[in-house]
Image (cartoon, helix red, strand yellow):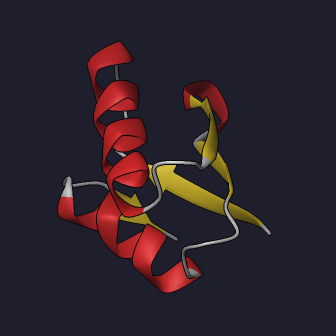
């Protein structure tokens, strides 16, 4: 299932890696695509709920809209 998030607060490559790693900790098999300029994170996951993925992003300190 594809989950699309609007995420603010990512300002650099380190931020992208932190978000990607947090998402992969929720679902190690997820496919993660991040477009920092558009504040867009797309996750393909059949094992994790939208809520769990959003929580993982928020726990890294980023705002999920």
Residue 4 at x, y percent in the picture? 71, 61
Q: Residue at x 42, y 47 (%)?
A: 24
Q: Is residue 55 above or below residue 16?
A: below
Q: Residue at x 57, y 79 (%)?
A: 50
Residue found at the far right of this picture: 1
The quadrant where residue 13 appears: top left
Q: Residue at x 36, y 42 (%)?
A: 19
Q: Is residue 62 left or right of residue 47?
A: left
Residue 3 at x, y percent in the picture? 71, 66
Q: Is residue 26 left or right of residue 39?
A: left
Q: How many marks?
A: 0
The quadrant where residue 12 appears: top left
Q: Is residue 34 above or below residue 14?
A: below
Residue 33 at x, y percent in the picture? 66, 35
Q: Nearer the viewer, residue 17 or 62?
A: 17
Q: Quadrant of the N terminus?
A: bottom right
Residue found at the far top of this picture: 13
Q: Nearer the viewer, residue 14 or 29?
A: 29
């Amino acid at each position: 299932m594809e989950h699309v998030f609007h995420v603010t607060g990512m300002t650099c490559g380190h931020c992208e890696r932190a978000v990607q790693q947090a998402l992969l900790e929720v679902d190690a098999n997820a496919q993660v695509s991040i477009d920092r300029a558009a504040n867009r994170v797309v996750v393909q996951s059949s094992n994790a709920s939208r809520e769990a993925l959003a929580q993982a992003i928020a726990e890294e300190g980023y705002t999920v809209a």
